[in-house]
Image (tube, grey):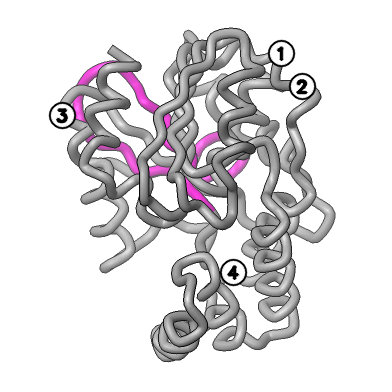
Amino acid sequence: MREGVLAGGAPYLEFGTGSPLVVFRTALPDSTNPTGFARWAEVRSLKPLAERFTVLTVGRRPGLRPGVTMADLAAHHAEGLRQRFDRPVDVLGVSTAGCLALQFAVDHPGLVRRLVVGAAGTRLGTEGRHVQRRYADLLAAGRHRAAAMALAPIVADSLPGRALLAGLLGLASGHPADPDGMVAMVRAENAFDIEDRLGEITAPTLVIAGSEDALYPLKLAARVADKTRRGDLKVYRGRRHHTVMSDRRFTKDVFEFLL
C-alpha cells in the first residue's frame, strides 16, 4: 500500500500490480485518504481489481468551496494525472464519482484509455436531486444526523423501511471532517448534466447500472451507453444504487471490458 498527494493536492492510495486503473473516489466526509474501517472498506471493494491492475484511488482536493462544478473537479484530477502518467489510463467511477468520470472523459479525452461508469447517468433523476439537495442543505446547516437520515429513500422503498433505516443512519452518523467540501461536491453533482456532450467521449465506455437505482434511474444510465461513440451497458436486475458495485458480477464485467 502506497499513499501520497497528486499535483494540486488530491490524496491517493495505490495498491496492486499491473497497468494503471485510476478510481475516482465518490463523495466522502473527508478530503484526506480514508483511515480505519473506511480504508478497509475501500481497499476490500477494489482488491479483486488489484490482482490485475495497479489501482490508484483519488480523492478530492481539500478546501472546496460552494460553486465548484464537475468540470472544475475534473480539471483538478487532470492536473494531477497528467503529471503522474505519460499515457492515457483506464478510469473508473461509481455514483458521484461516475459523473465525475464522465465529465473527465468529455473534457480531457486524451487522458482516458477506457472508461467504466457505475450507478451514474447523464444527470440525477428527479428523486435523486430531491434527496441530494435536502442532504446538502442539512449538512451545510450543521445538522449532520438529519442529513444522514435524509439518505434513507435511496436505500429502502417502503415507508416503514425508510423510517427504520433513517434511524439507523442517524445513529451511525458522525461529524464530517470536511463538511464544506462534501457539500460542494454534492451540489456539483446536483447541477451536473452531461447529456448534450456525451458524443464527445472518444474512449470505449462501459456503463453498469442497477435496475432499481433511485438516484440514477436506468433510462438515464442507458442514455450514456447509447450516446457515447463506443458505449456498452450492463444492467444488474434488482440492484439498487448502493449495491451495484458490491454485485459479484461487477469485477468480472470490469475485467472483461478493460482487458
Eye-nearest disc, 1 or 4? 1
Q: Position of residue 46 (x, y in %)?
A: 27, 42
Instruction: Identify which residue is drawn at 74% across, 58% down.
Output: 187
Residue 220 falls in image quadrant: top right
Is mark 2 in CB contact (under 8 Å) with mark 1?
yes
State how far apart marks 1 and 4 are (Cα): 34 Å
State how far apart marks 2 and 3 are (Cα): 34 Å
Over which residues does the magenta segment extend? Answer: 6-26
Q: Eyeballing the image, is 217 above or below 35?
A: above
- Counting residues from the start of the chain, the first of labels 2 and 3 encountered is 3
> Residue at label 2?
197
Q: Position of residue 124 (x, y in %)?
A: 68, 49
Q: Nearer the viewer, residue 177 or 136?
A: 136
> Residue at label 1?
200
Crowding at dot 4, Cα within 10 Å, few <14 / some 14-19 / many 20+, comes out as some
- Counting residues from the start of the chain, the first of labels 1 and 3 encountered is 3
